[in-house]
Image (cartoon, rainbow, N blue to C red):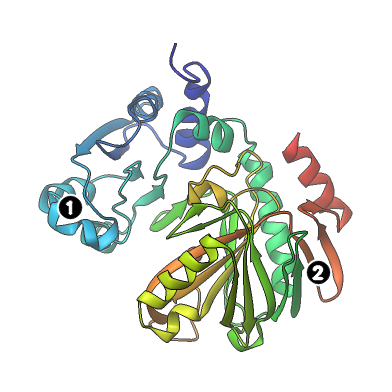
């Protein structure tokens, strides 16, 4: 018996119906590479067919890199030709096409496309992070906590591992909510995350990564402590992994690699710390800091965003959060306001 062979069917149906709202006769492109999970791909194609729609599954050899680094190894014209003519594109590639030339061209030319990035998906992760989740309730919860957070001016976050950091929100910058809703002409990620970029020069304090940091490491064996002044990392402490992280940042010889880029909340009730950053950054009650390059979507007030040689994300588990001195989370649990705490409890059942 293959892992979660029965349960995977429901997870695929939730993806196709609840998240992507696939309609009869729509064409759904499913892309994968030779490191993708075949059971996940086939279960999804089956659910698409069952919905009365037309699956097109495209397998490619796994490129050596992701995004634009994958370009030379991809059958670009064939992928662009096919994917500009689908209604929905589900990406299961292991070395992702997201931000590759194929992706950029398809997004530009196929203006009604609904795209979702589910890189590194396997049956276990799909059952936990999609199959067992009440997507409507999750979406309601995420919209509410995003609204409360956006209304706040000042945010403080602490964790048991020693994080104690604060910042001011920027009134013109959006909170990007990955809620499990994919409207036409948008690209989406696995549900259960909210990201935003605060006023950079107001970020001060200590950030302790105690979950994972990727690139360059993955799951952490020991914490990495960052001292942050006015939005920049000024000191890195810890053991061997902290030294590895520090020399990785240094290797770019780019001062913007010390710039904090975004903060994110993780809120997928099924996510667990596995070393796969897509899942780790959705662990319930975790906060994540992005470092380096800042995409234009996060900072509409800065045309073109803030360029840097690369980008990395690190996870702080069991976060406590205060918005304008009102505590809304305590060590990973949502405690205030009561209706939000109630929704959180129901989602975590
Ligand atoms: Fe990030």
Q: Quadrant of residue 134?
A: top right
On screen, residue 240 above or below 277:
below
Q: Position of residue 338 (x, y in %)?
A: 88, 53
> Can see residue 278?
yes
Could you say which is closer to the camera, residue 92 or residue 228?
228
Disc 1 or disc 2, which is closer to the eye? 2
Instruction: Report the residue marked by disc 2.
Output: 322
Residue 96 relative to residue 60: left or right: right
Residue shown at 86%/58% (left/top)?
337
Quarter of the image for the N terminus: give it: top left
Instruction: From the top left corner, tell me how far across and down residue 301 is, in percent.
Output: 50, 86
Residue at far top of view: 1
- Residue at image position (12%, 47%) is 78
Image position of 287 (left or right of 30): right
Q: Answer with left or right where residue 54 lies relative to residue 134.
A: left
Q: Which residue is mark 1?
A: 80
In front here: 279 or 248?
A: 248
Viewer-proximal residue, 257 or 26?
257
Element type at marker 1?
helix
Q: Are marks 1 and 2 in contact (CB under 8 Å)?
A: no
How far is the residue under mark 1 from the one under mark 2?
46 Å
Q: Earlier in the sequence, mark 1 or mark 2?
A: 1
């Amino acid at each position: 018996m293959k892992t979660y062979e029965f349960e995977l069917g429901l997870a695929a149906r939730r993806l196709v119906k609840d998240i992507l709202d696939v309609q009869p006769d729509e064409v759904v492109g499913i892309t994968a590479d030779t490191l993708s999970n075949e059971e996940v791909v086939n279960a999804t194609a089956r659910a698409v067919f069952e919905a009365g729609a037309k699956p097109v599954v495209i397998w490619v050899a796994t490129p050596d890199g992701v995004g634009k680094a994958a370009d030379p190894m991809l059958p670009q014209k064939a992928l662009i030709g096919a994917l500009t003519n689908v209604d929905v594109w589900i990406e299961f590639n292991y070395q992702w096409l997201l931000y590759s030339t194929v992706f950029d061209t398809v997004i530009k030319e196929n203006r009604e496309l609904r795209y979702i990035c589910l890189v590194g998906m396997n049956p276990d992760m799909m059952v936990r992070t999609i199959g067992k989740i009440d997507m409507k309730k999750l979406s309601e919860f995420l919209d509410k906590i995003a609204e409360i957070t956006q209304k706040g001016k000042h945010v403080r976050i602490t964790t048991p591992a020693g994080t104690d950091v604060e910042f001011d929100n920027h009134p013109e910058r959006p909170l990007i909510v990955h809620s499990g809703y994919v409207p036409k002409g948008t690209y989406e990620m696995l549900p259960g995350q909210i990201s935003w970029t605060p006023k950079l020069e107001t970020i001060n304090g200590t950030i302790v990564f105690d979950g994972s940091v990727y690139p360059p490491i993955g799951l952490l064996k020991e914490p990495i402590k960052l001292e942050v002044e006015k939005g920049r990392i000024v000191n890195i402490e810890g053991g061997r992994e902290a030294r590895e992280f520090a020399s990785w940042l240094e290797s770019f010889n780019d001062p913007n690699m010390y710039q904090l880029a975004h903060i994110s909340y993780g809120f997928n009730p099924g996510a667990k710390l596995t070393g796969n950053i897509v899942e780790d950054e959705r662990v319930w009650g975790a906060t994540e800091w992005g470092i380096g390059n800042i995409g234009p979507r996060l900072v509409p007030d800065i045309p073109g965003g803030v360029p840097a040689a690369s980008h990395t994300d690190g996870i702080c588990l069991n976060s406590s959060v205060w918005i304008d001195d009102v505590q809304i989370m305590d060590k990973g649990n949502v405690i205030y306001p009561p209706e939000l705490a109630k929704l959180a409890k129901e989602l975590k059942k």
